[in-house]
Image (cartoon, grey):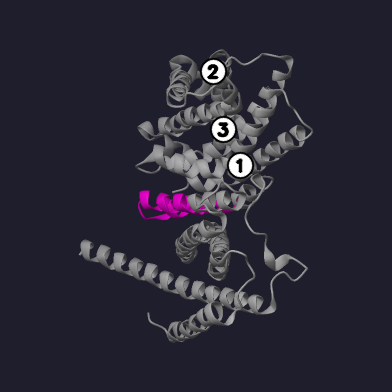
Amino acid sequence: MRSKIDKILLIFLFIAFSVSIYLIFLWVPQIKASNPAEQIAQRIFYFHVPSAWLGFLAFFVVFCGSVAYLATRNRKYELISVASAEIGVLFISLVLITGPIWAKPVWGIWWTWDVRLTSSLILWLIYVAFLMLRRYLPDGSKRANLSAVVGIIGFTDVPIVYYSIRWWETQHPKAVMASSDGSLAAPMFFAFMFSLATFTLLYVYLIRKRYQLLTLEDTLNKQFKEMEIL
Amino acid sequence: MMRTAISILKKDLRMEFRSKESILAMWIFSLLIFVIFNFTFEVSRLVMLEIAPGLLWVAFVFSGMFGLNQSFALEKENGNLRAMALMPVDGGQIYVGKFFSVTIIMLMFEALIFPIFIIFYDLQLSLGMFRLIPVLLAGTIGFTSLGTILSAVAVHTRNQQILLSLLLWPLVSPIIIWSVTLTGMVLSGEVTEAFYPLLLRVGAFDVIFFTLSYMLFDFILED
C-alpha cells in the first residue's frame, strides 16, 4: 500500500513545513501593535486561517463524495467522504483551539458569541454528528446511504448557518486578504500563501493515508468474513 | 398522485387523535420546561420579557423532538418501516405524508401551549399578536422539514433519540435563530421593517429544506 507518491509527498511536506515555520516565526516582520502580546499572538493567524480553509475544503469534499456515492454506489466515494469528514473535524477543532489562544491576549477573553466563532462551532457540531451517526450504524450500504444524505444536507446548511448569524456585530478581524488598501504587507501575504499551500498539501497527504487505511480495513474485514464461512 | 402521502397522513393523525400520546407528552414537557426555567433563573419581569421568545422556542424545539422521534419509531414496530420501503411508490411521498403529520401535530401542540405561556409570563395580548401565526408556521415547518428526514435517518440507529438531537439542532439552528428574533419583534410590539424580509427568508429556507429532503428521502428507505 505504501506508494512512492506518498513518500515524495511526505518529504515535500517536511520541507514545506520547515520553511513555513521559518517564514512565520523568523522571516515575517513584526506587526505594529500597541500591545506586545498581540504582536506575538498575531502569528497564529498563519495557522488559524489555513486550518479554517482546510476545514471548508474537507467538508466540500464530503459533499462531493456523498453526491458521487449516491449517483454511482461506489464504495470508494463513501470512504473518501468519511476520510474527509474526519480531517475536516480535526482542522475545525484546530481553528476552535487556535482562535481562543489568540483571542485571550488580544480581546482579553477566550470566547465570545460572535458570528464567526458561533458559526464555526455549529459547523464543527454538524460534522461531529455526521461522524457519530456512522459510529452508531452497522457497516453496510444502509450506513453509506444515510451518511451520504446527511453529508449533502450538512453542506447545504453551511452557507445558511453563516448567513443566519451574519448581521450580528462582528469582533472577528475582517478577511484581510480581500481588502484593497493593502492592509496585509507583501511579506505577510507571501508567508500566508505559503502556509496555505503547505496545509493544502497536508490535506492531500492525510486524505490519501486515511483512504488507504479505510480500504485496508475493508480488505481485512472481507478476509475475516471469508474465514468465518470456512 | 399524492394518495400514499395522504393515507400516511390520515393514519398518523387518526393514531394521534385516538391516543393523544404525542401532543399530551409534548404539552406536559413544555409545562415542565417553563417550571424548571422559573426555578433555575429567577429573573425580573423586564428581563423575562426579553428572554420569553427564546424560552418559547426552547420549549417548542425540545418538545418537538418527542414528536419527531415518535414519528418513525412507531413505524419500526412490527417491521413497518421495511414494509414502507417495499411499497412500490416514490419515497418522497412517504416523506410528504410524515412531514405533514408531524407538522400538524406540532402546530396543534403549539396552539395549546401558547395560552399557558401568555398566562405564565404575563404577556399583553394584542391584535399584533396575529403576526405570530406566520412566524410559528414558518419556524415550525423549517424544524419539521429537516426533522422528519433526520428522524428517518436516526431511527436506524441504536441511540435514536440522542442522535436525532445531535444531527438536527446544529442544522436547524439558523431557522431557530431567525424565529426567535421574529417572535421577539412580535411579543415586544416592535415590528420593524426587517420583519417581513426576515420572515420571507425563513420561508425560503423552509422550501429549500423541504425540497432537498423530498429528493433525498428515497435513499434513506433503500436497503
* First-in-chain label (3 vs 1): 3
Q: Is residue A140 magenta?
A: yes
Q: Which residue is mark 3?
A: B99
Q: Is residue A177 above or below residue B94?
A: below
- Asked whether, in this view, residue A174 is left or right of residue A43, the answer is right
Amino acid type at circle 1 is Pro
Tell which subunit mark 3 falls on: B
Q: Secondary structure at mark 1?
A: helix
Residue B194: horizontal and vertical position, in percent? 76, 35
Q: Which residue is mark 1?
A: B174
Front residue of A40/A87: it is A40
Q: How far apart are the alpha carbons under marks 3 and 1? A: 20 Å
Q: Secondary structure at mark 3?
A: helix
Tell me where the magenta segment starts and ends, as one range.
A127-156
Have a look at marks 2 and 1 and say if they share a chain. Answer: yes
Overall secondary structure of the magenta section: helix
At x 74% / y 32%, what residue is drawn? B195
Residue B131: horizontal and vertical position, in percent? 71, 23
Q: Is residue B53 above or below residue B148?
A: above
Have a look at marks 2 and 3 and say if they share a chain. Answer: yes
At x 66% / y 43%, what residue is drawn? B208
Res. A111 visible in picture: yes
Q: Is residue B204 magenta?
A: no
Circle 1 packing at 10 Å, graded few (<14), some (14-19), many (20+), is many
Have a look at marks 3 and 1 and say if they share a chain. Answer: yes
